[in-house]
Image (cartoon, rainbow, N blue to C red):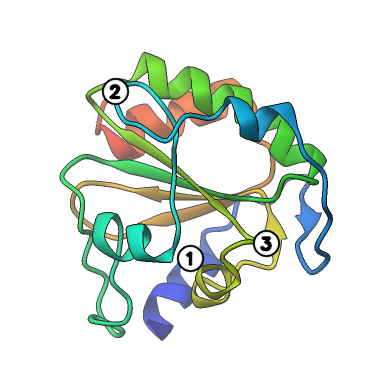
Amino acid sequence: MKKFIFFALAILAVNTACGSSTNHNDNTKTEKNMETTENGKVIHLNKADFLTKVYNYEKNPNEWKYEGDKPAIVDFYATWCGPCKMIAPLLEEMAKEYDGQIVIYKVDTDKEPELSAAFGIRSIPTLLFIPAEGEPQIGQGAMPKATLKKAIDEFLLGKK
């Protein structure tokens, strides 16, 4: 796990981000609009889902082993975070556009602090880009659509 965290921290693409140490209660339309089913939808994960669909760090603490069969993005976010609210519609759009090719997950850092701690998430939004094979990469901040598409096409899908 130390190797993974070091690798992830070395690849940070730093943009504007929120600190995630404060818990705010703000009901937003963004979270209410997110669906929890597949087929072109963003999927919200709790710890149990994360362990079965993404990475079981309890079972494999020293080695990255992706549990999914399609490349994925995991968005670590909070409902009160401005940049998280900015990137949410882009992730919804990407889920539809890349339906059947990638899966997009969301993890609420306020509801799942253990997952945030396991990945060293200190600012949000933080996106974990997971190829079907190989090591994941982390990007921070509300990246523009062109950057997000480039990461999906080149890193996750291997297109040039």
**Residue at position x 57%, y 76% in the image:** 117
- Type of amino acid at the residue the image marks with label 2: Asn
Residue 119 spot, x, y in % from top left: 50, 71
Q: Residue at x 66, y 48 (%)?
A: 125
Q: Quadrant of the N terminus?
A: bottom left
Q: Quadrant of the C terminus?
A: top left
Dot 1: element: helix
- The residue that label 2 is drawn on is 39
Q: Which mark is residue 134?
A: none
- Estimate the x, y position of residue 77 in percent, counting from the top left: 64, 49
Residue at (18, 52) in percent of width and height: 133
- Which residue is label 1 attached to? 8
Under tag 2, what secondary structure? Answer: loop
Kindly identify the amino acid type of the residue bearing the numbered disc 3.
Asp
Cα distance in 3D space between marks 1 and 2 = 28 Å
> Residue at point 29% right, 23% down?
39
Image coords of residue 18 (percent x, y)? 80, 53
Determine the image quadrant of residue 29.
top right
Query: Relative to the observer, which residue lies in front, 34 or 18?
Result: 34
The furthest residue to the top: 97
Q: Which residue is mark 3?
A: 110
